[in-house]
Each structure stands twice: as C-alpha cells, then as structure tokens.
Image (cartoon, rainbow, N blue to C red):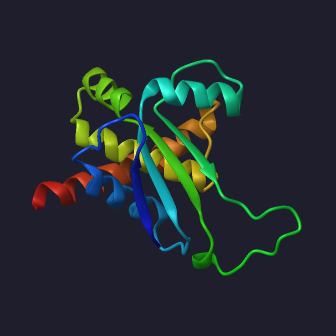
Amino acid sequence: MTISFHTRGARRPLAENHAAQGVRAALGRRRVGEMNVVWTSRRALRKMNVRFRKTDRFTDVIAFRHDPAPGERRRRAGDTPFGDLFIAVDQARRNARRFGVSYNEEIVRLAVHGTLHLLGHTDYTPAPRARMWAAQEPLVRRVMARAKRK
C-alpha cells in the first residue's frame, strides 16, 4: 500500500509519519491500493462538507472511498486506489487544545478516524459512533505509545 501526502492551503504537520502509522494501524492486514492524505484547512473542509454532504458546518476530516464505477469489475485489492483523506490541520490544533492532547496525537486520531470511515464505519448516530470510537482509540494509543518509545 502506498500513502501519499499532499498539502492544499495548509502547512505539512511534523506528525506526518505518525499519521501514516495511524492509517496502517487502522487498516490492519487489509490489502488496499493507494491512499492520499491531504493536509488542508477547516475552511476548505467546510466547503467540501457543503458540496458533498450538503452539511454547512466545520469538520476536521472528510474521507472519500474510491469504489469501482458501476459495472466495473474490482481488480485485486492492492491494485486500485483506495481513498482520499482530507484533514484540517488548523482544526486538529483546536481539537488538541480543547481535548487536552498533543497536536501529534490529534493528527494520528484524525488519520485513524478517516481511515475507519473509508472502511465503512460511521459516526452519525450514537451507537455506530460508540463502536467507531471503541475501534479508534486503542489504535491511537498504540501508535502514540510506539512514537514515545522512539
């Protein structure tokens, strides 16, 4: 699997390598193709939220899964693009202050969270949100524990 990082209207966070570890942790042993992580702003994500989700509010991560076109046969799992994550780095900084965690940890959390969305998890109602967070937080703790040992 290839993870490519891009910037669009935001500075590249120093925690990029931790974000990649978070994505890999969330994927586990699943074989997927290419994935893009785009560092952007909360303003840009709000515009995307309006355009694609018809929701006019700020968010911190948006995920787009690359599924085959209707009628197109799925190739082997590792051959096709998997998805794109757009992460608002300025919102990650706000979240970190609000929740009393490090900026690096919040970047990892958003990378894991977005990857779980790509895998089909939702957080729009309480029960699925609880299941998603139950899957997400142990992965974040594992990545951050590994980062502290280095």
74, above or below 129, in the image: below
Q: Quadrant of residue 128?
A: top right
Residue 25: image location, x then y, percent: 39, 62
- Residue in the picture at 33% in, 47% down: 108
91, above or below 139, in the image: above
- Residue in the picture at 34% in, 26% down: 95
In this view, the residue in front, 80 or 141, is 80
Check the image and name the residue furthest to the top.
56
Residue 80: image location, x then y, percent: 63, 72
140, above or below 3, in the image: above
- Residue in the picture at 39% in, 55% down: 5
Q: Is residue 97 left or right of residue 71?
A: left
Q: Is residue 8 left or right of residue 95?
A: right
In this view, the residue in front, 31 or 89, is 89
Residue 27: image location, x then y, percent: 48, 64
Check the image and name the residue furthest to the bottom.
76
In this view, the residue in front, 44 or 134, is 44
Q: Quadrant of the C terminus?
A: bottom left
11, above or below 114, in the image: above
- Residue in the picture at 71% in, 25% down: 54
